[in-house]
C-alpha cells in the first residue's frame, strides 16, 4: 500500500509521535483528543473524548477513573461517527494501560460497527525501553518505512548518557523517588526505573517493567529520597507544579533530605515521561540533567523541567 492510500488513525499520543518520527504524518487522518505532538497534528480530526473533566483535583480523577474501570466502561469514548467518515485503513492503539488510552476491546467494538471497511488494528504494549524500540520497528515494518536510522540515533543518545555516568561511584548515584500521581501517591513505573538507572540514579519503590503502585505516605517519608521528581501522568509543567505544591504543604515534607538540599523537581510528564515513544530518550536526558548537572546540560530546563 503506497503512502497516499494509507489512512491512519492514532488513538494514543505515543503512537502519533512514532508515526511522525517515521515520516508518516501525512498519512494520519484521525487522532485522539490527547495527541498534541508534533504541534501541527492538532489540525487533524479528533476521534475520542474523555468521559469526565480532568480539571478537578487528582483524588477526584483517580476515583472517577476507578469507577469507570470497575464498571468496565472505557475512560475514553470513541466517536464512531467520525471514525466512520474517516474510513481508516489502520488504527493504532495500545493494550497496556486503560487509564492512558482507548483500550483494545473498545477499539474492536467500535470497528465492528463499521460496515464498509475493516481497518487493521495495531496494538502497542510497551513496558520497557526495549519494547518501545520494538514498537517503532513494528510500526515501520507495517507501513514499509525504514526505522534503522531513527533507532540508531535514539540508541546512540542513550549510550552517550550511560557512558558519561560510567565513572561515578555508588555514593554518587542519588536515590530518587519519581512521583507519577499525587493523590493517592503513586510512583513512576514501567520504563521509569530503567531511565533513572541509565541517568545515574537509584530508583526507589518501582521495578523496571512493572506497573505503577500506590505508595503509603509514611513509607515515602521514611525512604527519605535524595531527589524527588514529579511527573504526574497527563499533566504539564504548570499543573504539575500545582499538584506538587499541595504535597509540600504537609508538615513531614520539611524533614525530607531532598527538600532541605533543594533537589525537588517538577517536569512535564505529559510530554515526556508518560509517553512510550521517541521522546523517552529526551526524558532520559532530562533526568540526566536533573541528577548530574555537573556532567549534563541539554537545555531542557525551563521548558521540560524546573526546580520546585
Image (cartoon, helix red, strand yellow):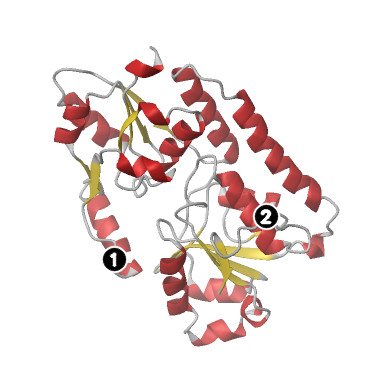
Image position of 42 (left or right of 174): left
Residue 67 placement (x, y as % from top left): 24, 57
Name the side, left or right, on which 231 lies relative to 260. left
Is tag 2's residue or tag 1's residue first in the polypeptide sequence? 1
Q: Which mark is residue 298?
A: 2
Indicate the position of residue 28 as horizontal and vertical percent values: 35, 30
**Residue 254 tag number:** none
The quadrant in which the C terminus is found is bottom right
In what element is the residue under mark 2? loop
The kind of secondary structure element at disc 1 is loop
Label 2 Cα neighbours within 10 Å, binned few <14 / some 14-19 / many ≥20: few
Tell me the residue at 60%/63% (across/down): 301
Q: Is residue 252 visible?
A: yes
Name above or below for residue 300 compared with residue 14.
below
Residue located at (47% from left, 54% from top): 212
Residue drawn at (73%, 63%) of the image: 293
Front residue (pair 238, 72): 238
Give how far across and how far down residue 118 sits, in percent.
24, 18
**Does residue 208 appear in this view?**
no
User: Mark 2 and mark 1: span between their CA atoms?
Assistant: 32 Å
Occupied quadrant, residue 137: top right
Q: Which residue is mark 1?
A: 55
Q: Residue at x 52, y 30 (%)?
A: 136
* Nearer mark to the viewer, of 2 and 1: 2
x, y percent for residue 52: 22, 57
Q: Quadrant of the N terminus?
A: top left
Amino acid at each position: 500500500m503506497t503512502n497516499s492510500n494509507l489512512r491512519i488513525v492514532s488513538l494514543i499520543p505515543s503512537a502519533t509521535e512514532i508515526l511522525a518520527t517515521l515520516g508518516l504524518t501525512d498519512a494520519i487522518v484521525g487522532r485522539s483528543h490527547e495527541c498534541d505532538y508534533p504541534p501541527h497534528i492538532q489540525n487533524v480530526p479528533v476521534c475520542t473524548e474523555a468521559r469526565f473533566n480532568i480539571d478537578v483535583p487528582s483524588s477526584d480523577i483517580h476515583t472517577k477513573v476507578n469507577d469507570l474501570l470497575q464498571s468496565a466502561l472505557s475512560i475514553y469514548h470513541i466517536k464512531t461517527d467520525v471514525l466512520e467518515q474517516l474510513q481508516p485503513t489502520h488504527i493504532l492503539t495500545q493494550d497496556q494501560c486503560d487509564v492512558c488510552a482507548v483500550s483494545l476491546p473498545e477499539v474492536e467494538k467500535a470497528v465492528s460497527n463499521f460496515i464498509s471497511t475493516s481497518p487493521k488494528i495495531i496494538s502497542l504494549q510497551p513496558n520497557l525501553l526495549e519494547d518501545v524500540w520494538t514498537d517503532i520497528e513494528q510500526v515501520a515494518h507495517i507501513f514499509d518505512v525504514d526505522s534503522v536510522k531513527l533507532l540508531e540515533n535514539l540508541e546512540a543518545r542513550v549510550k552517550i548518557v550511560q557512558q558519561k555516568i560510567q565513572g561515578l561511584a555508588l555514593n554518587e548515584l542519588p536515590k530518587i523517588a519519581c512521583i507519577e500521581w499525587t493523590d493517592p501517591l503513586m510512583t513512576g513505573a514501567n520504563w521509569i526505573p530503567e531511565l533513572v538507572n541509565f541517568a545515574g540514579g537509584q530508583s526507589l519503590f518501582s521495578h523496571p517493567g512493572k506497573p505503577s503502585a500506590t505508595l503509603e505516605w509514611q513509607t515515602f517519608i521514611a525512604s527519605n529520597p535524595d531527589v524527588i521528581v514529579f511527573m504526574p501522568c497527563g499533566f504539564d509543567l504548570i499543573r504539575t507544579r500545582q499538584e506538587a505544591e499541595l504535597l509540600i504543604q504537609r508538615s513531614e515534607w520539611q524533614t525530607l533530605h531532598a527538600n532541605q538540599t533543594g533537589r525537588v523537581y517538577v517536569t512535564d510528564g505529559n510530554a515526556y515521561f508518560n509517553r512510550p515513544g521517541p521522546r523517552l530518550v529526551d526524558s532520559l536526558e532530562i533526568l540526566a540533567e536533573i541528577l548530574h548537572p555537573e556532567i549534563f546540560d541539554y537545555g531542557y530546563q525551563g521548558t521540560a523541567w524546573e526546580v520546585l
